[in-house]
Amino acid sequence: MSEFTYTSPLAGVIKPGVYGASKTAPGVAILETWRSLYSIMPRNGQQSVVSGVTRERYGLPLPDIGRVTSNAEHSMIWSGLNQWMLAGALNETDINFPELADALKDMAALVDHSHARSIIRLSGSQARHTLAKLCALDTHPRSFSSNYSAATRMAHISTLIHQIDAAPLYEIYVPRAFARSFFSELCEAAAEYGYIAEPLRRDP
Amino acid sequence: MRINCPLCGERASDEFSYLGDATPGRPPSGASLKEWHDYVYLRDNPRGPHHEYWHHVGGCRAWLVIHRDTFTHEIFDVGLACDIEESVG
Ligand SMILES: [Zn+2]
């Protein structure tokens, strides 16, 4: 829906491959991905009306604090005080921004972040241990699990974490200008377990 | 030091930035120059309980009002600044 093409900030930073201690049984997978991404901030007193609109359009009402509503393709991620992030399908530009902006006219502030964030998918048996080196969030399943989100700092960078699956599978949103710093810190943390790295396969 | 954000839960203090004293109230329009001078420039520096503005800049980005002891660092209460401002009027 946009005339702009996304260019990965990690392009040329790392070749796809297996790195670190264990090349035969890597414990972590680090995949770069892309989604169209929009922040939604309801105006005063408009939260339930906005939630009705997003429920009707995508089947995704605005979730509670620290939670995510999702369907097979899209997610509505709580990302801060009175703010949610609508994330589109994996590597597709599938959300009609002008239509959504029109539907939320006078109800919410809507901002396109599709080219502002770098998204890392983190999974594998040692993903939680890797995260533990980067942030102070308690990611034990008793306090953080599927359809949870948190805004926190990692490597001194403000990040947004969305746990997608209990397996575990996380997606971490990082301001794109900090993507290289974050990526190198993450790879450093995963090195002792061995990790698969996969940069964005194609620019969507 | 850890701060219990009303939205995010307990987080390390390095996720927060300190703005300043939350006690001064904005003078009404038409207030004297002296009142404005006091509001803009003059602050107490208490040793003990104090209300302060903090920003959860590394998290939910909410402005907080924290009631804490500047001597013992004990935190008595953390609230959202928007709720507190609304209740004050
Ligand atoms: Zn917070």
Image (cartoon, rainbow, N blue to C red):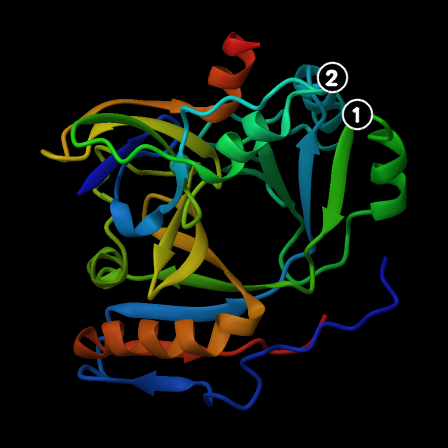
The number of numbered badges drawn on the structure is 2
Secondary structure at badge 1 equals: loop
Residue at horizontal 47 percent and vertical 25 percent from the top: B81
Q: In this view, does B63 lie to the left or right of B18?
A: right
Identify the mark at residue A33; answer none if there is no mark.
none
A19 or A45: nearer the eye? Answer: A45
User: Disc 2 and disc 1: Cα gap in Å?
Assistant: 8 Å
Q: Is residue B89 left or right of residue A26?
A: right
A75 or A42: nearer the eye? Answer: A42
The single residue placed furthest to the left in the displayed view is B72
Chain identity of mark 2: A
Mark 2 residue crowding within 10 angstroms, few (<14) / some (14–19) / many (20+):
some
Query: Which of disc 1 and disc 2 is earlier in sequence?
Result: 2
The image shows residue A162 at horizontal and vertical percentages of: 45, 46
A29 or A10: nearer the eye? Answer: A10
Identify the mark at residue A49; answer none if there is no mark.
2
Q: Can residue A4 be seen in this view?
A: yes
Q: Do labels 2 and 1 share a chain?
A: yes
Secondary structure at badge 2 equals: helix
Q: Is residue A147 left or right of residue A175?
A: left
Residues at marks 2 and 1 touching, judged by CB atoms closer than 8 Å: yes
Residue located beneath label 1 in the image:
A107
Instruction: Check the image and report above or below for B87 versus A193.
Output: above
